Image (tube, grey):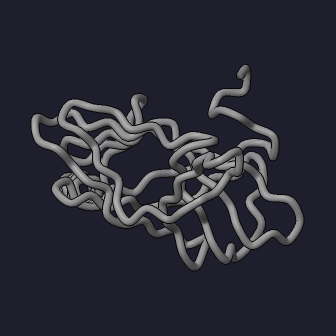
Protein backbone atom coordinates (compact mmCIF):
# COMPACT_ATOMS: atom_id res chain seq x y z
CA UNK A 1 0.00 0.00 0.00
CA UNK A 2 2.85 2.39 0.85
CA UNK A 3 4.43 1.70 -2.53
CA UNK A 4 1.17 2.55 -4.34
CA UNK A 5 0.80 5.81 -2.40
CA UNK A 6 4.43 6.74 -3.03
CA UNK A 7 4.05 5.99 -6.76
CA UNK A 8 0.90 8.12 -6.92
CA UNK A 9 2.64 10.99 -5.13
CA UNK A 10 5.57 10.82 -7.56
CA UNK A 11 3.27 10.79 -10.59
CA UNK A 12 1.27 13.77 -9.31
CA UNK A 13 4.49 15.62 -8.55
CA UNK A 14 5.66 15.14 -12.12
CA UNK A 15 2.43 15.88 -13.97
CA UNK A 16 0.69 18.36 -11.70
CA UNK A 17 -2.05 17.94 -9.17
CA UNK A 18 -5.76 18.15 -9.96
CA UNK A 19 -8.10 19.56 -7.38
CA UNK A 20 -11.44 21.29 -7.20
CA UNK A 21 -9.70 24.59 -7.98
CA UNK A 22 -7.97 23.28 -11.11
CA UNK A 23 -4.63 21.70 -11.97
CA UNK A 24 -1.60 22.96 -10.06
CA UNK A 25 2.13 22.66 -10.64
CA UNK A 26 4.42 24.77 -8.48
CA UNK A 27 3.06 28.32 -8.43
CA UNK A 28 0.88 27.81 -11.52
CA UNK A 29 -2.82 26.99 -11.29
CA UNK A 30 -4.64 26.03 -14.52
CA UNK A 31 -8.39 26.53 -14.12
CA UNK A 32 -11.51 25.62 -16.12
CA UNK A 33 -9.92 24.14 -19.25
CA UNK A 34 -12.53 23.63 -21.97
CA UNK A 35 -12.81 23.19 -25.72
CA UNK A 36 -15.58 23.57 -28.23
CA UNK A 37 -16.82 20.50 -30.05
CA UNK A 38 -15.84 20.45 -33.71
CA UNK A 39 -18.15 20.09 -36.67
CA UNK A 40 -17.57 17.33 -39.18
CA UNK A 41 -14.03 16.68 -40.27
CA UNK A 42 -12.59 20.08 -39.42
CA UNK A 43 -8.82 19.96 -38.88
CA UNK A 44 -8.67 22.57 -36.13
CA UNK A 45 -10.01 22.97 -32.63
CA UNK A 46 -9.78 25.55 -29.88
CA UNK A 47 -9.13 25.38 -26.12
CA UNK A 48 -9.71 28.05 -23.48
CA UNK A 49 -8.32 28.18 -19.95
CA UNK A 50 -7.52 30.50 -17.04
CA UNK A 51 -3.84 30.61 -16.02
CA UNK A 52 -3.12 31.84 -12.50
CA UNK A 53 0.38 32.59 -11.20
CA UNK A 54 0.30 32.26 -7.41
CA UNK A 55 3.99 33.12 -7.07
CA UNK A 56 5.96 36.29 -6.42
CA UNK A 57 7.98 35.91 -9.66
CA UNK A 58 6.73 36.17 -13.26
CA UNK A 59 6.09 32.90 -15.11
CA UNK A 60 5.86 32.00 -18.79
CA UNK A 61 3.89 29.36 -20.72
CA UNK A 62 6.41 28.07 -23.25
CA UNK A 63 4.86 25.02 -24.92
CA UNK A 64 1.70 22.93 -25.28
CA UNK A 65 1.15 19.33 -26.35
CA UNK A 66 -1.85 17.01 -26.61
CA UNK A 67 -2.38 13.60 -28.18
CA UNK A 68 -5.58 14.79 -29.93
CA UNK A 69 -3.71 17.08 -32.36
CA UNK A 70 -0.43 17.10 -34.27
CA UNK A 71 0.26 20.63 -33.03
CA UNK A 72 -1.03 22.94 -30.30
CA UNK A 73 -0.08 26.60 -29.91
CA UNK A 74 -1.35 29.83 -28.42
CA UNK A 75 -2.89 32.28 -30.88
CA UNK A 76 -4.27 35.76 -30.39
CA UNK A 77 -7.33 37.15 -32.14
CA UNK A 78 -7.17 40.88 -32.80
CA UNK A 79 -9.25 43.45 -34.64
CA UNK A 80 -7.33 45.80 -36.93
CA UNK A 81 -9.08 48.33 -39.14
CA UNK A 82 -12.38 46.47 -38.70
CA UNK A 83 -10.87 43.12 -39.73
CA UNK A 84 -10.40 40.17 -37.40
CA UNK A 85 -7.04 38.46 -37.64
CA UNK A 86 -5.21 35.76 -35.75
CA UNK A 87 -1.50 35.36 -35.07
CA UNK A 88 0.60 32.76 -33.29
CA UNK A 89 2.09 33.77 -29.92
CA UNK A 90 5.40 32.12 -29.00
CA UNK A 91 4.88 32.36 -25.23
CA UNK A 92 2.41 33.77 -22.70
CA UNK A 93 3.69 35.89 -19.83
CA UNK A 94 1.99 35.38 -16.46
CA UNK A 95 2.69 38.32 -14.14
CA UNK A 96 3.58 37.64 -10.51
CA UNK A 97 0.41 37.02 -8.52
CA UNK A 98 -1.58 37.51 -11.74
CA UNK A 99 -4.12 35.90 -14.05
CA UNK A 100 -4.16 35.44 -17.82
CA UNK A 101 -7.45 34.37 -19.37
CA UNK A 102 -7.43 32.47 -22.65
CA UNK A 103 -10.95 33.12 -23.93
CA UNK A 104 -13.05 33.50 -27.07
CA UNK A 105 -12.03 36.63 -28.99
CA UNK A 106 -8.58 36.91 -27.40
CA UNK A 107 -5.73 34.60 -26.52
CA UNK A 108 -6.62 30.92 -27.04
CA UNK A 109 -5.01 27.56 -27.77
CA UNK A 110 -5.35 26.35 -31.34
CA UNK A 111 -5.27 22.62 -32.03
CA UNK A 112 -4.02 21.94 -35.54
CA UNK A 113 -4.39 18.72 -37.53
CA UNK A 114 -6.84 17.07 -35.16
CA UNK A 115 -6.55 13.30 -35.12
CA UNK A 116 -10.35 12.95 -34.58
CA UNK A 117 -13.29 15.30 -34.06
CA UNK A 118 -13.76 16.79 -30.59
CA UNK A 119 -17.11 15.54 -29.33
CA UNK A 120 -19.25 17.17 -26.65
CA UNK A 121 -18.97 15.46 -23.27
CA UNK A 122 -15.54 13.98 -23.89
CA UNK A 123 -12.33 14.98 -22.13
CA UNK A 124 -8.75 14.83 -23.34
CA UNK A 125 -5.31 15.42 -21.80
CA UNK A 126 -3.14 18.42 -22.58
CA UNK A 127 0.27 19.28 -21.17
CA UNK A 128 1.18 22.93 -20.63
CA UNK A 129 4.86 23.57 -19.95
CA UNK A 130 5.94 26.61 -17.96
CA UNK A 131 9.45 28.03 -17.77
CA UNK A 132 9.75 27.84 -13.98
CA UNK A 133 7.00 25.43 -12.85
CA UNK A 134 7.61 22.85 -15.58
CA UNK A 135 4.90 20.67 -17.17
CA UNK A 136 1.35 20.35 -15.87
CA UNK A 137 -1.01 17.84 -17.45
CA UNK A 138 -4.66 18.89 -17.42
CA UNK A 139 -7.95 17.38 -18.59
CA UNK A 140 -9.88 19.48 -21.10
CA UNK A 141 -13.69 19.15 -21.15
CA UNK A 142 -15.31 19.38 -24.58
CA UNK A 143 -18.41 21.61 -24.52
CA UNK A 144 -21.00 22.05 -27.25
CA UNK A 145 -20.14 23.66 -30.59
CA UNK A 146 -21.72 27.02 -29.68
CA UNK A 147 -20.36 27.29 -26.12
CA UNK A 148 -19.08 30.69 -25.06
CA UNK A 149 -17.86 29.73 -21.58
CA UNK A 150 -16.90 26.66 -19.55
CA UNK A 151 -20.18 26.82 -17.62
CA UNK A 152 -23.42 25.35 -18.98
CA UNK A 153 -25.54 28.23 -17.62
CA UNK A 154 -23.59 30.96 -19.47
Q: Residue lying furthest left in this view?
A: 56
Image: 136 above or below 54: below
Left or right of 68? Residue 10 is: left
Say which residue appears at 59% left-offset and 62% top-offset.
Answer: 110
- Outermost residue to the right: 40
Which residue is located at x 39 percent, y 42 percent? 30
* Quadrant position of residue 48: top right
x, y (%) of residue 72?
Answer: 52, 68
The quadrant holding residue 148 is: top right
Residue located 67% across and 77% down the image: 113
120 over 19 or under it: above or below: below
* Residue 7 visible: no
**Left/right of residue 64 with respect to residue 129 in the rendered view:** right
Most extreme residue toward the top is 153
Q: Position of residue 16 (x, y in %)?
A: 30, 51
Q: Is residue 56 above or below residue 66?
A: above
Q: Position of residue 73 (x, y in %)?
A: 49, 65
Report the quarter where the C terminus lies.
top right
Amino acid sequence: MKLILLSSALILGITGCAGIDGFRQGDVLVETPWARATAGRTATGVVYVRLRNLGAAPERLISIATPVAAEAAVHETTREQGMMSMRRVNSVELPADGVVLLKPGGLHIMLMRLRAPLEEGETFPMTLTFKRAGPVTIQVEVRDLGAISPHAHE
